[in-house]
């Protein structure tokens, strides 16, 4: 039994390192075709590891949505979005109406991207960190990995760490992924319309941030 547990831990480390390395390769590849190549490899690796793991819907957070999670996550996400908007306006910042319309026109695609990010963060990275270090420490471990993936964009990295800690803690408590996807999309769109591209570089990470 100890040998089997040791193997499972080593395999969990292997999964985390492998998928994270593929994602970093995608983020730091300058050519779009190469980025897509690495992103595809990362997606295949995640799918393969999930097939080997054969997780339950409960483990993935894809079971019946938790009503308490929906109320709490969406309420706090709306409050955070409102606070960010009010803070920007109070500091003399402006919200460009054209930027708002442009981001709203792309909101459908971003909602899908937010859902993908939350699935990777919670259903893949958090669950494996949880197996290795326990659920409480996994909140910090997974959120830190998520934030580091947004380097070298300092503002997006900071937002990602704060958001990652919040969403990972909500996942730990409620094991409900759907409200986290919506909350992530709401906050991401709010950041996009309130923070200038001179700081956010169009919310890019990796080499895209440097080449903006």
Image: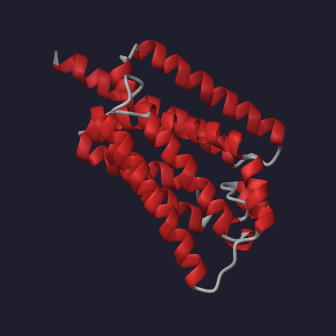
On screen, 139 above or below 99?
A: above
- Name the residue at 27% across, 40% down: 173
28 to 92, vertically: above or below = above
Measured from the top left, where is residue 125 in percent x and y?
43, 36
Nearest to the observer: residue 57 or residue 104: 104
- The residue shown at (28%, 32%) is 131
Q: Using residue 86 as the reference point, say whether residue 4 is left or right of it.
A: left
On-image quarter of the N terminus: top left
- Rendered residue at 61%/36% (across/down): 22
Residue 11 appears anywhere in the view: no
- Residue farthest along the bottom direction in this orientation: 92
The picture quadrant where one finds residue 203 is bottom right
Vertical order, 90 against 100 (above or below)? below
The one nearer the camera, 170 or 140, is: 170
What is the tally of numbered marks visible in this picture? 0
Task: Residue 89 in the image: state x and y as whole percent.
Answer: 60, 79
Residue 59 left/right relative to 203: left
């Amino acid at each position: 039994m100890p040998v089997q547990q040791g193997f499972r831990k080593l395999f969990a480390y292997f999964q985390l390192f492998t998928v994270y390395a593929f994602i970093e390769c995608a983020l730091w590849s300058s050519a779009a075709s190469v980025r897509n190549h690495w992103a595809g490899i990362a997606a295949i690796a995640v799918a393969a590891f999930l097939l080997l793991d054969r997780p339950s819907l409960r483990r993935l957070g894809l079971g019946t949505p938790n009503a308490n999670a929906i109320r709490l996550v969406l309420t706090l996400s709306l409050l955070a979005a409102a606070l960010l908007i009010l803070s920007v306006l109070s500091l003399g910042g402006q919200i460009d109406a054209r930027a708002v319309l442009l981001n709203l026109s792309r909101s459908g695609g971003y909602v899908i991207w937010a859902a993908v990010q939350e699935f990777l963060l919670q259903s893949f990275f958090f669950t494996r960190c949880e197996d290795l270090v326990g659920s409480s420490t996994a909140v910090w471990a997974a959120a830190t990995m998520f934030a580091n993936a947004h380097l070298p964009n300092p503002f997006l990295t900071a937002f990602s760490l704060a958001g990652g800690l919040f969403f990972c803690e909500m996942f730990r408590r409620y094991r409900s992924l759907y409200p986290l996807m919506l909350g992530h999309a709401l906050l991401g769109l709010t950041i996009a319309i309130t923070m200038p591209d001179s700081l956010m570089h169009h919310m890019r990470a990796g080499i895209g941030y440097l080449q903006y």
